[in-house]
Image (tube, rainbow, N blue to C red):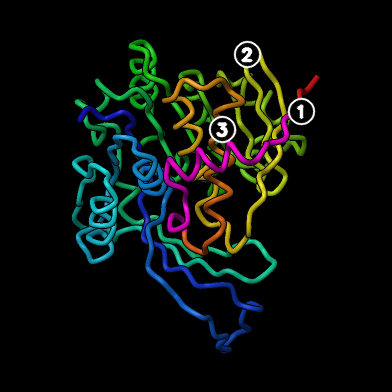
């Protein structure tokens, strides 16, 4: 089957614990009900979420020659993702994150970028670039080998043939991040940072002003995701604020990636921007019902039923 979406970028193995009552002090052990090994990283999470929705999706990225790399490839494959674009590289370890969930608090991360640092534009499968309707790059700014003019040229060529480009980032404090963004935002149809990333990158606290700043840098449409505060969407002919769907919150890991996958589903269904945000918000709401990044994400039928039953607050912006 032809690939509908190429999901490229960071691939991680996550070691994630169920919520604990408080973070441990030095030398202290705080028990968790369970600790699991699960899939992580924007590109891996979004790919698996899209496969659950019935989308033909291929993953592209790099893993190490170790047990974590084997786990990522097998988890994607068994989840219905084409893994022909995942490269095993010698030397670096597979990227891994330890995720600490404290009840009532945001997540804490200890992370190793590992083999993701080896990825460059040559790792993007040419056949998939030629056929995909949507190109998604997840984890930009955590992929130093892709912060080049070569990626900008790939994006330019994709848009010239009618492929929609969707970019998300992981900000890691690099002072050259705006320079890296300047290489790709002029070739980006949809840019989807979260509010913490947008604040760090722009220095602005207002999400509308953040979106406008990224549009001045070249992005066609900007979606600022804001967790429990919903999202702000600013495009060439529309500006609106979306609320959130009702859900049971267990953990926020992967919620942004689930939003991205749902948004892409809306694009593939040729939804308008409000429809795309409905899909993104529904998948994000389903994701947070579990501590891991992908285990609770809706199937297509579940998402359609949920969206039909629950209205999403939408408010136009001046």
Looking at the image, the residue that sits furthest to the right is: 318
| Disc 1 to disc 3: CB gap under 8 Å | no
In 3D space, how far apart are the residues under numbered discs 1 and 2 (Cα atoms)?
A: 17 Å
Query: Closer to the camera: disc 1 or disc 2?
Result: 1
Decide which of tag 1 and tag 2 comes sooner along the chain. Answer: 2
Q: Is 102 placed left or right of 269 in the picture?
A: right
Q: Nearer the viewer, residue 201 or 35?
A: 35
Q: Is residue 297 magenta?
A: yes
Query: Closer to the camera: disc 2 or disc 3?
Result: 2
Query: Residue 273, position in %: x, y?
Result: 58, 23
Q: Label 2's element? A: loop
Q: Which residue, given by chain and number where applicable, does mark 2 sit on?
A: 236
- State whether residue 143 appears in this view: no
Decide which of tag 1 and tag 3 comes sooner along the chain. Answer: 3
Q: Is 87 placed left or right of 228 in the picture?
A: left
Q: How many marks?
A: 3
In 3D space, how far apart are the residues under numbered discs 2 and 3 (Cα atoms)?
A: 22 Å
* Label 3 CA crowd tier, 10 Å (few <14, some 14–19, many 20+): some
- Position of residue 251 relative to residue 144, above or below, is below
In 3D space, how far apart are the residues under numbered discs 1 and 3 (Cα atoms)?
A: 30 Å
Q: Which residue, given by chain and number where applicable, does mark 3 sit on?
A: 178
* Label 2 CA crowd tier, 10 Å (few <14, some 14–19, many 20+): few
Q: Residue at x 53, y 57 (%)?
A: 253
Disc number at residue 315? 1
Q: Label 1's element? A: strand
Indicate the quadrant where residue 111 lies. bottom left
Query: Residue 286, position in %: x, y?
Result: 54, 51
Numbered range of the magenta stretch = 293-315
Q: Label 3's element? A: helix
């Amino acid at each position: 089957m032809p690939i509908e979406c190429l999901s490229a970028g960071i691939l991680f193995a996550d070691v994630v614990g169920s919520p604990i009552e408080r973070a441990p002090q030095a030398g202290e052990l705080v028990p968790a009900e369970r600790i699991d090994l699960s899939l992580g990283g924007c590109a891996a999470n979004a790919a698996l979420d899209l496969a659950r929705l019935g989308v033909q999706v291929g993953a592209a990225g790099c893993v190490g020659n170790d047990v974590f790399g084997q786990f990522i490839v097998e988890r994607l494959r068994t989840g219905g993702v084409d893994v022909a674009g995942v490269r095993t590289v010698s030397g670096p370890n597979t990227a891994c994150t330890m995720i600490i969930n404290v009840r009532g608090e945001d997540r804490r991360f200890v992370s190793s970028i590992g083999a993701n640092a080896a990825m460059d534009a040559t790792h993007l499968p040419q056949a998939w670039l030629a056929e995909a309707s949507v190109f998604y790059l997840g984890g930009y700014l955590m992929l130093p080998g892709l912060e080049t003019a070569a990626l900008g040229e790939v994006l330019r060529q994709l848009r010239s043939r009618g492929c929609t480009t969707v970019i998300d980032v992981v900000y890691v404090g690099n002072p050259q991040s705006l320079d890296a963004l300047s290489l790709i935002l002029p070739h980006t149809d949809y840019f989807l940072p979260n509010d913490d990333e947008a604040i760090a990158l722009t220095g602005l606290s207002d999400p509308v002003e953040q979106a406008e700043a990224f549009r001045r840098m070249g992005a066609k449409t900007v979606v600022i995701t804001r967790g429990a505060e919903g999202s702000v969407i600013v495009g060439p002919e529309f500006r609106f604020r979306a609320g959130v769907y009702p859900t049971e919150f267990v953990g926020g890991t992967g919620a942004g990636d689930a939003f991205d996958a749902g948004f892409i589903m809306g694009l593939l269904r040729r939804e308008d921007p409000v429809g795309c945000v409905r899909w993104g918000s529904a998948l994000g709401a389903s994701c947070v019902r579990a501590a891991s990044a992908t285990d609770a994400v809706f199937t297509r039928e579940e998402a359609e039923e949920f969206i039909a039953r629950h209205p999403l607050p939408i408010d136009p912006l001046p």
